[in-house]
Image (cartoon, rainbow, N blue to C red):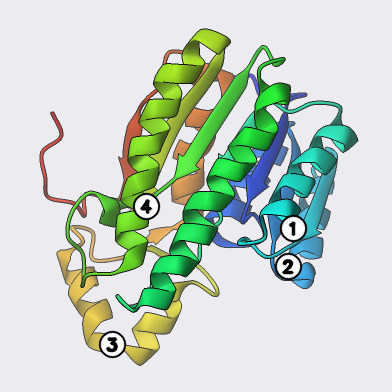
């Protein structure tokens, strides 16, 4: 199936590793120009080189997710460099943590506000596109209780609700908005890699609850994400797709 991505222009926040990088790599493979932002320049440079090797334009910018001016500047730079924008994937995250107050601020500023700022800055370019799409990356932990009370889960739940509100508001303007929630996913440098070592009982408990007895992989999440963001999913908007290998137990009506 042709996803209709060739020649389109995409921006992915948090796109230098893990799920974000896998999404960028697959978009580039499909012929889409890709811009990313993240913290570490070394990972950014490696990702950009990988994307360019697939024959597309690619760029990256190092920034702190809580720096609103930097996030907005990256979006403006992407639009200027690519002469437009068709796809925005809001994937930037502070990751999990405890219920301590400082994590609430971190997740609010990085997970939630980086997404809202990126969307706001990208909107003028997206509404000019014939294939405009926004994809918000949340988490299955936003849908049901998971491990312990923490800011990450609740802030991601806010993103799920916000994505549905955006979808209702933006569809008349030709911009699709969807949300994708990965289940526990393992990749180099992931929180789960650390948890496997530092909190082995928690890790083992999660694996036992996974029907396949393994965690997901970034490429498995990326394939669903790229479809949802692509013109091939033209009749999908306001959707919330769980990609968790059957980890969640609630029935979706």
**Coordinates of residue 230 in the picture (x, y in percent):** 56, 25
The answer to which quarter of the image holds residue 211 is bottom left
Between the C-alphas of marks 3 and 2, the distance is 27 Å
Circles 2 and 1, Cβ within 8 Å, touching? The answer is yes
Crowd rating for badge 3 (residues with CA inside 10 Å; few <14, some 14–19, many 20+): few
Q: Which disc, if any, is residue 28?
A: none
Judged left or right of residue 120, residue 128 is right
Circles 1 and 3, Cβ within 8 Å, touching? The answer is no
Disc number lying in front (1 or 4): 4
Between the C-alphas of marks 1 and 4, the distance is 25 Å
**Coordinates of residue 47 in the picture (x, y in percent):** 74, 58
Q: Nearer the viewer, residue 88 or 16?
A: 88
Q: Which disc, if any, is residue 47?
A: 1
**Coordinates of residue 206 in the picture (x, y in percent):** 22, 70
Q: Which disc, if any, is residue 43?
A: 2
Dot 1 or dot 3, earlier in sequence? 1
Q: Is residue 178 above or below residue 94?
A: above
Q: Is residue 170 visible?
A: yes
Between the C-alphas of marks 1 and 3, the distance is 30 Å
The answer to which quarter of the image holds residue 229 is top right
Crowd rating for badge 2 (residues with CA inside 10 Å; few <14, some 14–19, many 20+): some
- Secondary structure beneath dot 2 equals helix
- Secondary structure beneath dot 1 equals helix
Q: Which disc, if any, is residue 156?
A: 4
The residue pinned by badge 3 equals 200
Judged left or right of residue 227, residue 159 is left
- Secondary structure beneath dot 4 equals helix
Between the C-alphas of marks 4 and 2, the distance is 25 Å
Give the residue at x 55% y 46%.
115
Dot 1 or dot 4, earlier in sequence? 1
Between the C-alphas of marks 2 and 1, the distance is 6 Å
């Amino acid at each position: 199936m042709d996803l209709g991505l060739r020649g389109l222009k995409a921006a992915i926040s948090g796109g230098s590793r893990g799920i974000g990088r896998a999404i960028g790599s697959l978009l580039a493979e499909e012929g889409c120009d890709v811009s990313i932002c993240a913290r570490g320049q070394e990972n950014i440079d490696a990702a950009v080189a990988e994307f360019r090797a697939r024959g597309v334009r690619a760029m990256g910018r190092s920034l702190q997710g809580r720096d609103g001016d930097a996030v907005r500047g990256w979006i403006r730079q992407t639009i200027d460099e690519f002469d437009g924008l068709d796809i925005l994937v809001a994937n930037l995250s502070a990751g999990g943590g405890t219920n301590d107050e400082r994590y609430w601020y971190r997740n609010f500023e990085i997970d939630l506000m980086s997404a809202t700022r990126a969307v706001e800055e990208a909107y003028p370019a997206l509404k000019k596109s014939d294939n405009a799409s926004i994809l918000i990356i949340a988490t299955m932990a936003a849908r049901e209780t998971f491990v312990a009370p923490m800011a990450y889960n609740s802030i991601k739940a806010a993103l799920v609700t916000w994505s549905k509100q955006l979808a209702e508001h933006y569809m008349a303007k030709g911009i699709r908005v969807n949300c994708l929630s990965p289940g526990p996913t393992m990749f180099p440098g992931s929180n789960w890699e650390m948890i496997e070592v530092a909190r082995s009982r928690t890790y083992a408990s999660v694996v036992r609850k996974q029907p396949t007895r393994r965690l997901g992989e970034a490429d498995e999440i990326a394939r669903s994400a790229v479809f949802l963001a692509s013109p091939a999913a033209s009749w999908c908007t306001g959707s919330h797709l769980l990609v968790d290998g059957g980890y969640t137990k609630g029935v979706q009506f």
